[in-house]
Image: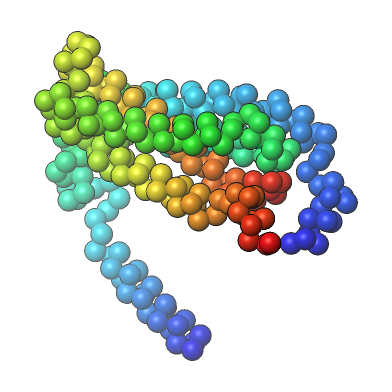
Amino acid sequence: MKLLQERIQKQQIGESLIIQTAVRLLVPFIQIFGLYVIVHGHYSPGGGFQGGVLLGSSFIILALAFDLKTSQRLMSERANAVLGNAGALIFVGVAALCAIFGGLFLDYSALDVIIPLGPIEWRSFGIFLVEVGVGLAVMSIMVSLFWDMGSAGKMDEGL
Amino acid sequence: MKGLALIATLITGAILLYGTMDFPAWGDPHSPASGYLSTTYIEKAVEETHVPNLVTAVLGDYRGYDTMFETVVIYCAGMVVVSVLRRNKKEQVEKKT
């Protein structure tokens, strides 16, 4: 492992200017596409899982082309953990709110009591809320899996 | 031992392939898989949920529990990897001294 790292440092693999510039140009588009896939899940193939993976991959590609520190400057470990927990909590929280406001667990039409949109519209909107939660959770878990496995938990340099 | 494993795998594969002969034809409207619930979903999903994409309607609404626990599984996987692998630098220094 050490030998490999030394060889990489000598050859400066992954420090290519072309790759870094291409990644820098690509990352905003990947993130916008990820958001589009999450939000447009009602009308086209896609949804929380796929969009979350796209958003997470935009940070992974940064960590691959530059290093772990660069990706952590753009998305700190703490913010990542907060987003992941918030995502899982949004899903379970929406489901629990449905139960609290007199419906069944995960029956979004019960949320009509809070904002009167109509029960059918709420079923559509509830799916959207849940997809956002899934997207956030998947994104942060993807990124933290890569960070932890790529640097063996040390978060120093990574791959 | 490897030969035995290969023979066992081949026999299992042959049995599974033989089992697929009883499957209904692909897209058969009278098969059990497309007989009961799926017709209800296809007919009523759009008017009941106002989501034009049937897959999203089934995933997010009718099969909400499934999606929720998928998220929980992914979340647990992430938390386990973080708690097993993540190390602080201070702890390492203490172990070395």
Q: Is residue A153 visible?
A: no
Q: Nearer the viewer, residue A5 or B3?
A: A5
- Quick one: B92 or A47, which is closer to the camera? B92
The vertical placement of A57 against A159, above or below, is above
User: Which of A46/A67 is in front?
Assistant: A67
Measuring from the top left, give residue A47's x and y in whole percent: 40, 31
Query: Residue B81: horizontal and vertical position, in percent?
Result: 49, 52
- Residue placed farthest to the left in the image? A102
Q: Which quarter of the figure has residue A59?
A: top right
Instruction: Indicate the colouring scheme.
Output: rainbow
Viewed as shown, does residue B96 lie left or right of B34? right
Give the residue displayed 35% in from the left and 44% down from the top.
B72
Q: Is residue A4 above or below residue A99?
A: below
Label total for image: 0
Side of A54 where A72 appears, left or right? right
Q: Which residue: 29% across, 34% down?
A: A92
- Name the residue at the top extreme: A116
Q: Residue at x 34, y 24 (%)?
A: A128
Residue B10, percent across and down? 42, 78
User: Looking at the image, which residue sits at the far right?
Assistant: A10
From this viewpoint, is residue A130 visible? yes
Q: Residue at x 47, y 81 (%)?
A: B6
- Nearer to me, A123 or B20: A123
Q: Residue A138 at x, y = what percent?
A: 45, 38
Quadrant into which the N terminus of chain A falls: bottom right
